Amino acid sequence: MATTTTRSRATSRGPLGPGPFPGVVVIHHMPGYDMSTKEIVRTFATQGYNALCPNLHYRALPDGDPGEAARLTREGGGVPDEQCIGDVAGASAVLRSMTTANGKVGVIGYCSGGRQSYLVACSLPFDAAVDCYGGRVAPAPEEITPESPAPVVELTASLSCPLLGLFGANDGNPSPEQTARIEGALQQHGKEYEFHTYEDAGHAFFSVDRPNFNVAAANDGWQKIWDFFGRHLEG
């Protein structure tokens, strides 16, 4: 890996060689900018991608412990959508400006980052997007309050790129009913997408350091990601 930058604001990794390489913005899960997320960024680099993960919780505790920053962010109501869009726009611009870039950039997110991946793909120009079990993209009516942001699924008409969704059948957020509502919106607006739901998996099945880790679902999910990004970013 030729490029290594690890700071409290972002982590980036790049493969060896002159390129050109596609870029991927990695959006971390709600536990924050942690070791498992940084390992995901490294994994993309080993597969030939320039990858960058912005620390969306940075402002809560600049130069402090990422776990504590995540806790403070949750207590403060989470990352505002407009702030997330701005941070991801900056990360995408960095990837597109790299001398080894091939001009194409995708985005992937996990858990809350899955919702944010859907959000930014409806708000910014991307070439491909992956939503890994993003909660509250299409919340149930009883979950919507005056304080909550508008459901992201309502932005589907503005989706800028093909979308891959990876979900667990035993997940409650998003539940299979919620993913069906998202799929309905994608079909309604004629968007290019593919969804895969793993019958024996729950939430966070990619997380190797959490009890919900599911080896079979994660291994197959990674293969789906490589195939999807390969088709849309490497050409």
Image (spheres, rainbow, N blue to C red):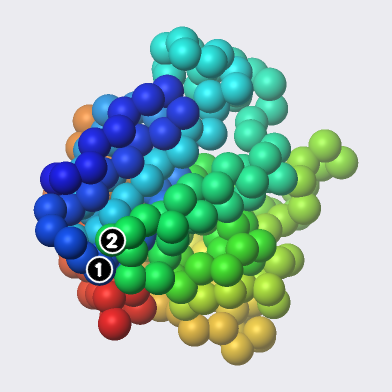
106 versus 64 height, above or below: below
Along the polypeptide, which appears first: circle 2 or circle 1?
1
Residue 90: in sight, yes or no? yes
* Residue 190 quadrant: bottom right
Task: Judge left or right: residue 75 versus residue 11.
Answer: right
Q: Amino acid at mark 2?
A: Thr
Q: How many marks?
A: 2
Q: Is residue 42 left or right of residue 79?
A: left
Q: Which label number is shown at residue 20?
A: 1
Q: Which residue is mark 2?
A: 100
Q: Alpha-carbon neighbours of circle 2 within 10 Å: few (<14), some, or many (≥20)?
A: many
Nearer to us in this view, 39 or 5: 5
Residue 205 location, x and y as percent?
A: 29, 46
> At 76% from the left edge and 46% from the top edge, which residue is drawn?
149
Give how far across and how far down residue 103 sits, in percent: 40, 71
Q: Left or right: 234 with respect to 78?
A: left
Left or right side of 74 for 134: left
